[in-house]
Image: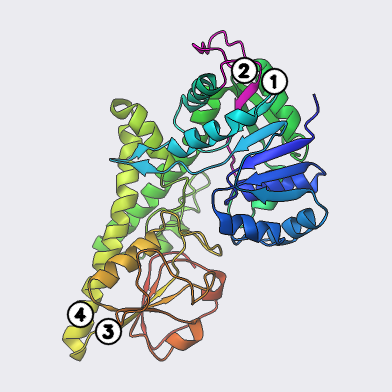
Amino acid sequence: MAFETISTIGMGYIGLPTAAAFASAGKKVIGVDINQAAVDTINQGKIHIVEPDLDDVVKTAVATGHLRATTVPEAADAFLIAVPTPFKGDHEPDVSYVEAAVRSIAPVLKQGDLVILESTSPVGTTEDVAQWLSEERPDLVPPPFNVQNPVLNINLAYCPERVLPGKIMQELVNNDRVIGGITPHCSERAIELYQTFVKGECIPTTARTAEMCKLTENSFRDVNIAFANELSIICDELDINVWELIKLANRHPRVNILQPGPGVGGHCIAVDPWFIVSKTPDESPLIRTAREVNNYKTEWVIEKIKNAALTFERDHGRKPVIACLGLTFKPDIDDLRESPALHIVQKLSQEKLNIIVVEPNIPISIHIPDINIYTNSIQLDDLENIKDKADIIVLLVAHKEFRKINFKHSQIMKFCSI
């Protein structure tokens, strides 16, 4: 059965680029999102996120009729679910968005359809998807669902994305894909779909292994970042330049220490390790500790800035103007999810400090969540305007616009490599 029509559920940072990639390969793509504003923007041939090259692909796909968006699922041959999986309670994964998406497509499913979960999920979620579908459509997935010997009239698989914001359109095409089918046949069908545009290798495995693979990749990175962040705190205590230290240590042929930062953000590295910890808390002390170290680094940065402000006030008899450079979770994107820089600015604003924020990837007029930019305590500004305003400059995100500046007249606090 050919995949003539593809539906992407969730048109955010992964769903929209994926839909655009299929559309650019000549497939008819229906994008589904509960956000009416996002749907309207896409149908105008525009994008509501910042991602290089995506705007041109979406514009062309909409103009040629290969891509359109809606708020209600419609019939298709393949359904890709790319919705958020946030926290609830004490770092417990919340798969309610996934469940809602699955139940929303159930009425339009037909025999032979392919359902792929792309959302980062705890191990076992793909089996939950089968269970939810069996409740909604017992004619397609007979209950009770038995993962060891399933009898399905649809195909079900898990395929995590592994792309870098800022390079999503290139990496969607060129990166290898791990394809975890609920059965080997399901894996084969999913591979057939992704080979529509993927040039990297599509590697079949089980659904559980694919789920764990995604979590493992980001937990590995989190542990390595935690080492760099802990090292930066140690160096501060011992009066050692951590940037020079890492540069020297990395001259060893088998050492490759990452650069420290103000914490870890994004909806992958800052989140995924907790999905492992929540399932196996007694077996994952290292993964938990790495998460705690990276979270602590953000609080440590806040205290360093507050202490610098107190010292300035003591020496000058007034509170300083503090310019915080960057709000996003990583350089050169507009993504604020789990951003340590955003958390730092939020906390500093609560301390009644005079904060200026420079974020070149977000319009000054936009409302930043949980920050009241219309108070006197915090304001968004252009980079050029802070030269004569700031007493303390805090570098939080290494945006390309910040790599050219030199504020010799101001106190600079550097919490990222630039």
Label 1 Cα neighbours within 10 Å, binned few <14 / some 14-19 / many ≥20: few
Label 3 Cα neighbours within 10 Å, binned few <14 / some 14-19 / many ≥20: many
User: Which of marks 2 and 4 precedes in the sequence?
Assistant: 2
Q: Which residues are magenta?
A: 137-162
State the image coordinates of residue 366 (x, y, percent, origin top left).
48, 72
Q: Nearer the viewer, mark 4 or mark 3?
A: 3
Image: 309 above or below 344 = below
Label 4 Cα neighbours within 10 Å, binned few <14 / some 14-19 / many ≥20: some
Question: Residue 311 shows which numbered tag?
Answer: 4
Q: Secondary structure at mark 1?
A: loop
| The magenta stretch spans residue 112 | no
User: Which of marks 2 and 1 precedes in the sequence?
Assistant: 1
Q: Secondary structure at mark 4?
A: helix
Q: Amino acid at mark 1?
A: Gln
Residue carrying label 2: 140
Residue carrying label 1: 111
Find residue 153 and report its image quarter.
top right
Marks 4 and 2 in Cβ contact (< 8 Å)? no
Q: Amino acid at mark 2?
A: Leu
Q: Nearer the viewer, mark 4 or mark 2?
A: 2
